[in-house]
């Protein structure tokens, strides 16, 4: 079985501040991990993914995430928030050959001017 | 351009009616999925399909039906048996790798269904 927990359903930061969105996963086999972003009334768009190899993964729009097996975490960060980063963010895990992903409940990021 | 197209974007249904949501992809992906999204509940899997003419129930399949007659198409029917159908519905597709853990999903723009 696989599962994802996103800590904090709402995160608020000031423009220019560090963004940190937390994700912990559970999996009995090596996981594939993903972060997606969703803007209002739109579908999800892939930000970045971890499959194998380098544990620090860089994605679009200046986001990155680090896979930490010992902590079963895959937290998303961005050094400096921009107003356009305001959106909902989903962490997902795929950890078996069924291919389908399990999504977290999402974290809404608010960026204050 | 390759992608996934969902239609319509907005759909209104009277109680007791069946409605069908369309999902078409031209990415040549084997796997397709339907998710339901409610505020604060993330994405919940309704049905998924790995190959043509085959599909499996997800976590909340009751009151829904699907078909996969063509690789490109995976329509979802919301039946009158679905007690609370008002939600945002997302269709997605992905490659299918039997030797790997999975691949990223590509999403359509969603259909917002409202029961009136």
Image (cartoon, coloured by chain):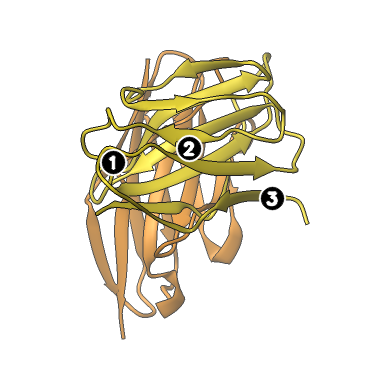
Q: Secondary structure at mark 1?
A: loop
Q: List x then y, in percent, for residue B101.
A: 58, 21
Chain under callout 1:
B
Q: Tell me: A28 left or right of A22.
A: right
- Marks 2, 3 in one chain: no
Residue closest to the eye, A51 or B35: B35
Residue at mark 2 to residue at mark 3: CA–CA distance: 29 Å
Q: Colour of chain B?
A: yellow
Which sits earlier in the primary sequence, circle 1 or circle 3?
Answer: 3
- Identify the image quadrant of the C terminus of chain B: bottom left
The residue indicated by pointer 1 is B85
Residue at the image position 30 percent from the left and 32 percent from the top: B80
State which quadrant residue A13 falls in: bottom left
Residue at the image position 55 percent from the left and 65 percent from the top: A62
Q: Which chain is orange?
A: A
Residue at mark 2 to residue at mark 1: CA–CA distance: 37 Å
Q: Secondary structure at mark 3?
A: loop
The residue indicated by pointer 2 is A67
């Amino acid at each position: 079985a696989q599962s994802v927990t996103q800590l904090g359903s709402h995160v608020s930061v000031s423009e220019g501040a560090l963004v940190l969105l937390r994700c912990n996963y559970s999996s009995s086999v090596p996981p594939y991990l993903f972060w997606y972003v969703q803007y209002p009334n739109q579908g999800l768009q892939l930000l970045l993914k971890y499959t194998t190899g380098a544990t620090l993964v860089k994605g679009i729009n200046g986001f990155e995430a680090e896979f930490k097996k010992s902590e079963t975490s895959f937290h998303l960060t961005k050094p400096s928030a921009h107003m356009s980063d305001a959106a909902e963010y989903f962490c997902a895990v795929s950890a078996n050959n069924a291919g389908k992903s399990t999504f977290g409940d999402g974290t809404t990021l608010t960026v204050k001017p | 351009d390759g992608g996934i197209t969902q239609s319509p974007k907005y759909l209104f249904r009277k109680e007791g009616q069946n409605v069908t949501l369309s999902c078409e992809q031209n990415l040549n992906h084997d796997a397709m999925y339907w998710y339901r999204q409610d505020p604060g509940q993330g994405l919940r899997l309704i049905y998924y399909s790995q190959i043509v003419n085959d599909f499996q129930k997800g976590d909340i399949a009751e009151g829904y039906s699907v078909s996969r007659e063509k690789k490109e198409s995976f329509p979802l029917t919301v039946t009158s048996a679905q007690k609370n159908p008002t939600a945002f519905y997302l269709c997605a597709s992905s490659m299918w790798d039997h030797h790997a853990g999975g691949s990223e999903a590509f999403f359509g723009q969603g259909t917002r269904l409202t029961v009136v």
